[in-house]
Image: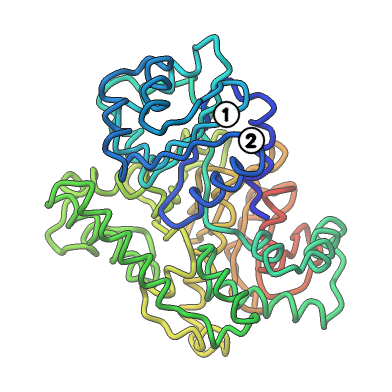
Amino acid sequence: MRKIKEDLKIWKENYKMPLMLVGARQTGKTYLLDNFCKNNYNNYIYINLEKDENAKKVFENSINPETIIEQLEILKNRTLNAEDTILFLDEIQVSERAITSLKYFCESDKPYKVVCAGSLLGVKINRFKSSFPVGKVNIKYLYPMNFEEFLIAIKEEKLLNEIKKHFANNEKLIEPIHDKALDLYKKYLVLGGMPALINNFIENNYNISHVNFELQEQIITAYLADMTKYTENSEGLKNNQIYNAIPKELARENNTFKFSIVDESARKIRYKSSLDWLLASNMVLKCSLTEKNESPLKAFISSEKFKLYLSDPGLLRALSNLDYQEILLEKNEMFKEVLTENYVACELYPNAKELFYYNFDKYEIDFLIKINGEIIPVEVKSGRRTNNKSLNEYIKKYKPQYSIRISSKNFGFENSIKSVPLYAVFCINNH
């Protein structure tokens, strides 16, 4: 089950504002909203504004809800009763007028129920030419499935509950269960959280050697196509260049992003709008260097130093053209570190909505996160070897309430360091 379903249930009870589901392509927005509408309402109208030109023209003609509903009733030969009908506007990003109309649906005296989704809605919101209906739309973000959702999808709820219990009490799992969880984590690292890949894994009886990994290539191709379809040619090319450069950036010893990785002659001013586009699209996540480990971390970020991660570890593996067996058999330790750090970023981001790392003296802390008002340093390791001076020096210098070390090691708490296995990173979000 996707965790977003709980948000949809809450919205159903207080539906006054239209709901907008924002996320990258192929994360399951249409599927989720379609099922929600079918299962919760007597009457359901689905309109794809990208495919249905006539419906799109209705919004171009008027943004008054009553007029829109009257004209859609005629077009679809349906009665749209506000009390028991839900309207799903898919691919709403193609009609700025349709987005503007959401304000008036919200303000109407009639109990209209409207949900919407679309590719690159984040970009559309950032570049809205008129006034976006802020405060009139309930915006929810959908990300690729995290490891917790993966375990639910493959019916490993008992294992999931055991992981949560041991995260809370810092007691080790017995080794066979710990090993099983690590094995599933490695498979997730290869698959990533795109629903198409996880469904294919399930359809093939959890046999990863039978998974159609071309699905990942197809998603990347669709992403790259979007970069040119919804932008001017020059910007689309720069979007493409930045996206394709991320594996190279992360594999560098100092993996701070530099525009020169994209193009030796590249300058920030030429690529900034493209980077903003990728971040707004949710295809890419940004981790900013904060120059002070004080709250609020965002107030002290460097505008020049940051890291970029792909929004899904499976897509990073595919974009890097890395054979999945190298990950499962642990034959490529260097790039496994890269995938692991990207995985942790993907697990942390949906809850925090922003990521930070920290440098001090000659040391680097992979992530700084805020838990219960405290700033907690997080160190990430792909294996069981956790000897790294950075975290120890941070503890010695700043004396945090406690620290987190993510690795292949079992649960534990020693010397004020909470050991979190790689398969339990999602628990940090729920902590």
Q: Tell me the element at label 1.
A: strand
In depth, the one of 362 and 329 nearer the eye is: 329
Say what amino acid the circle numbered 2 marks. Answer: Tyr
The numbered mark at residue 218 is none
Distance of label 1 from label 2 (alpha carbons): 6 Å
Say what amino acid the circle numbered 1 marks. Answer: Thr
Q: Is residue 385 above or below residue 259?
A: below
| Residue 284 place in picture, x, y as percent | 39, 54
Left or right for 321, reference 154: left
| Residue 137 place in picture, x, y as percent | 49, 25
Left or right for 28, reference 153: left
In depth, the one of 55 and 295 nearer the eye is: 55
| Residue 323 place in picture, x, y as percent | 44, 86
Q: Are marks 1 and 2 in contact (CB under 8 Å)?
A: yes
| Residue 377 place in picture, x, y as percent | 62, 53
Q: Is residue 109 visible?
A: yes
Residue hosting label 2: 41
